[in-house]
Image: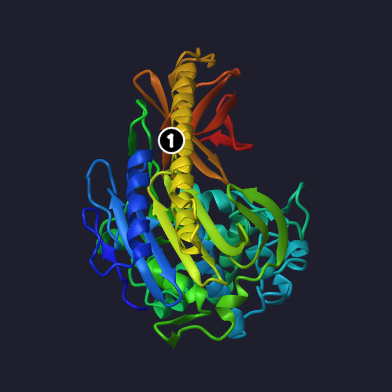
Amino acid sequence: MAAGLWSFATLGLAAPHASPEAKDIDAFTRKAMARVSVVPGLALAVVDGDKAVITAGYGVADVDTRAPVDAETGFYIASATKSFTALAIAGMAARRDLDLNVPLADWIGATSLPPDIASTITLTDLLSHRSGVENAPIAFRAAFSGEQSPELMQALLSRTVRSATTPHGTFRYTNTGYNLATTLIEARFGRDWRALVTDDVLAPAGMTHTTAWISKARRKGVVASGHVPGPTGALEPSRLQKTDATLQSAGGLVSTAGDMARWLEIQINDGVLDGRRLFPVGLVDSTHRSVVGQKVVFGPYTRDGYGLGWQTGRYGDDVLIHHFGNFAGSRAHVSFMPDRKLGVAVMANEDLIAGELADLVADYVYDRFAGRPDLEAHYDAELAELAARRDKRLAGLAAARAERAARPWSLSRPMDSYVGTYANAAMGRIAVTQEGDRMRVRIGVMSDLAEAFTKPETVRVELVPLQGQTILFDGPGRLTFEGETFVRD
């Protein structure tokens, strides 16, 4: 890749050699960050053809440490990981290690996956979200609790079931297909998803600052923390941060603006970077082709299909290949216009209050390059609307917290009688402890102090920040969580 024409840190100023587009994009991003004010940090990469227009960082990686964001700050890219995983698996198919379009039963060997499912669905089905199957325990352990091992996940293949609402061939976006695909590949070939993506995608791409281990990312440099509103509404690091155990094939990479610029150039140019072919002709492009239809309007975008790790659709009149991601205060926007050979990656460390800022910056880039005549007026209005939504969300959050705090407890017994460790073979173990007059609930890496809930013998927890879950104590030594029964040891 032509070295980034403009790369700078938080306090850097526009370089004299920066293009007019880069200067305008930088100015808008700074204005947007200041106007919206609740997004602590943001990283940005813009690629035009075979050159990086800008790779940049803004704000801070963590409101406590105040570490500045630059083009080499690591950000969790969440579900934008799927395009990397899908390309690695497509590469295996290109080498004829497996076939994307034959029933799984043709190559997986002996597994606990139900035979009727193995004989009727394919890897393409799994990677394009049209498999019509579900496996809640595998998806939960992989992305949330982190209580997993290869042996356990392979045993849990037996819990795969047909969806009651989405038949085979119908698009339904989940993490499950990717988790199932990589569990089966590991069982058959002995390569876990991290090795597959690292060796077959990241290494050829020269993405040396992108990793599937959060521990390695932190050894390389600063990693942005996801942020959520705290009790007063002020932003604070989310108590649920990604760990090595919860980085998984459907959402498990940490990357930087510099590396995402390389990724965009590879996508725009069918596997060519710096004039060198890194991936076989047609391989990268093949992942962009829609294999299942959908009809969705997502903000200013339309979505008409899904390929292998990529959403297909449009922004205005332009085809837009894209994938976004979010998790517990982290947000990623990765997109490119194949006809214009223009791509944008935006990563932010806040999502729930003003996550649309990532999309707004990307939209500004596309409209600036297109020469939109009312550019500044339009985006001033967009920022005003986002700021209004921010205020409404913060007010709604404060009101909801006040309402919950006023609820009476619905538990009929002394709190210490609920204390203990409750187990479910598929979902794992929930530890209930008492802290003063409060109840703490832990499952794997997730933890929260329980609140009162409205139904008898229930409590509410936010194991995922700002997403409430209910726990029902439905008998001595029993509780129900996510529809599953846990029994106290």
Residue 220 locus on image (x, y percent): 26, 64
Q: How is the image coloured?
A: rainbow
Name which residue lies at 50% across and 41% down. 429
Viewer-proximal residue, 341 or 308? Answer: 341
Q: Is residue 450 left or right of residue 311?
A: left
Who's the residue at 54% across and 33% down the image?
469
Q: Is residue 149 visible?
A: no
Residue 172, position as x, y percentages in the image:
68, 53
Label 1 sits on residue:
387
- Asked if residue 392 shows in the view, the reply is yes
Residue 244 lies in quadrant: bottom left
Quadrant in the picture for the N terminus:
bottom left
Q: Position of residue 140 (x, y in %)?
A: 54, 48
Residue type at the position of mark 1: Ala
The foreground one among 335 and 166 is 335
Determine whether the residue tagged by mark 1 lies in a helix, strand or loop.
Answer: helix
User: Tag count in the figure?
Assistant: 1
Q: Residue at x 40, y 55 (%)?
A: 347
Circle 1 Cα neighbour tier, 10 Å, few/some/many (<14 / 14–19 / ≥20) = many
Q: Nearer the viewer, residue 137 or 134?
A: 134
The part of the image, by quadrant, that contains residue 260 is: bottom left
Q: Is residue 287 above or below residue 464?
A: below
Q: Is residue 485 above or below residue 130?
A: above
